[in-house]
Amino acid sequence: MTHKLFSIVSAQNGELRGTTTIPKELQDFLSPGANPLALVCPTGYCFVRQLVLDDINLCHHTILIDKEDTYKLIINGPELTLTFPLENNILLTTESGDTLTLDEGQYAISKIPISELTTTFQAGHSYSFITISYREHIFSKLVAAYPNFKILSRSDVANQATCFRFPLHFATLEMKTIIGQILNTRCIDSDLNLLIKKGQLLDLLIKVAEDQIQQNGHSQLSISRLDTEKILEAKKWLDLQIDRPITLFELSRKLGINVHKLSSCFLQITGSTVFNYHRKVRMKKAMELLLETDKSLFDIGTEVGYIDGKTFSKEFKKENNISPFEYRKRYRLPMA
């Protein structure tokens, strides 16, 4: 099988054949918003959900095999790739012999020049990981927005034998949340659905860039007066958006500013990422509701953009080191 984005070759069985007829055993792995493809192999299944946009491609791989096998992934041209193992660890070997172990929950950012990755999957185990590739013009804008993020420019890696350039880090809660949204949310309108997905995929790349810069030192960007005014406008708008999460793509369209510049300028001016700032705005409103109303945790949670009271309580405690129930009990004054 030759896939638009990649092909997979089994060491025992050769190139895997693709079918859009999904076996019953894999129906539970279907998620909305992606085109499923099953790769048939005598040792088990390699199931791929793919989301193909004009300049971003996502593949979610699920590996279920009964007999140990080694797969070779042959890449057909992505420029910059993010890899996130979601279930079980993965040991990758490049065509030059370099190895990289990705633990569940970690991520790697890679830059081609390599075109092949090999990994061995153990019998009786299930593996799940996503790979997301971004085209040249997307990460060139990222480099412009983050001057210290030079490793992404083509000239910096042109002579490197290996594609893995950054130390591995564990995915943050925000990254995991965005990944969950990408895999599980869907709008009925297909065009709007793709627009939402693109925004989420750009948000994820921004979060990775911010995480890498935090680990390796902040970049300083010369910010124009006009861009400063737009960041202050963004803050005012975020202060009003308490009933739902937002995406960088949505905010950038509203302000007429590049998502990469928006993210880096916001961080430099406010000392906080867009996501962290907006989460604190919503939590501040939740605190007010806890102290000033008799509303249930479910009603307060949904009012500040969480799907239910349980999720809200978990995030509130993580943010404030106290549960919303205990916060209300400890700080609320007696009602007149």
Image (cartoon, rainbow, N blue to C red):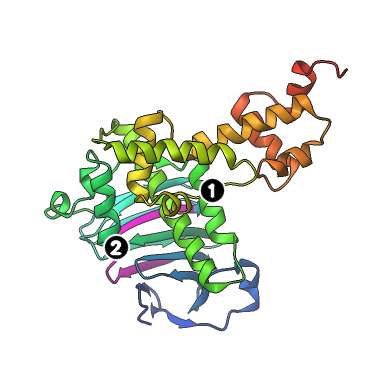
Is 258 in front, or is 310?
Answer: 258
Give the residue type that dot 2 points to. Answer: Arg
Number of residues whose C-alpha sits closer than 10 Å to that of mark 1, classed few (under 14), some (14–19) or many (20 or more): some
Q: Residue at x 52, y 58 (%)?
A: 182
Query: In the rendering, at what x and y percent does residue 77 appear?
Result: 27, 69
Query: Which residues lie in the magenta part?
Result: 67-85
Is 166 in front, or is 147?
Answer: 147
The quarter in which the C terminus is drawn is: top right
Is 114 in front, or is 59?
Answer: 59
In the displayed structure image, the side of residue 198 where residue 109 appears, left or right: left
- Helix, strand or loop at label 1? It is loop
- Helix, strand or loop at label 2? It is loop
Pointer 1 or 2: first along the chain: 2
Q: Residue at x 38, y 50 (%)?
A: 205
In the displayed structure image, the side of residue 153 where residue 135 appears, left or right: right
Give the residue type that dot 1 points to. Answer: Ile
Q: Main secondary structure of the magenta part?
A: strand
Is 78 inside the magenta-drawn segment? yes
The residue singled out by tag 1 in the image is 246
The residue singled out by tag 2 in the image is 135
Q: Are the residues tagged 1 and 2 within 8 Å (C-beta)?
A: no
Is 237 inside the magenta-drawn segment? no
- Inspect this view and state whether residue 87 appears: no
| Count of numbered marks | 2
Number of residues whose C-alpha sits closer than 10 Å to that of mark 2, classed few (under 14), some (14–19) or many (20 or more): some
Query: In the rendering, at what x and y percent does residue 66 appear?
Result: 55, 68
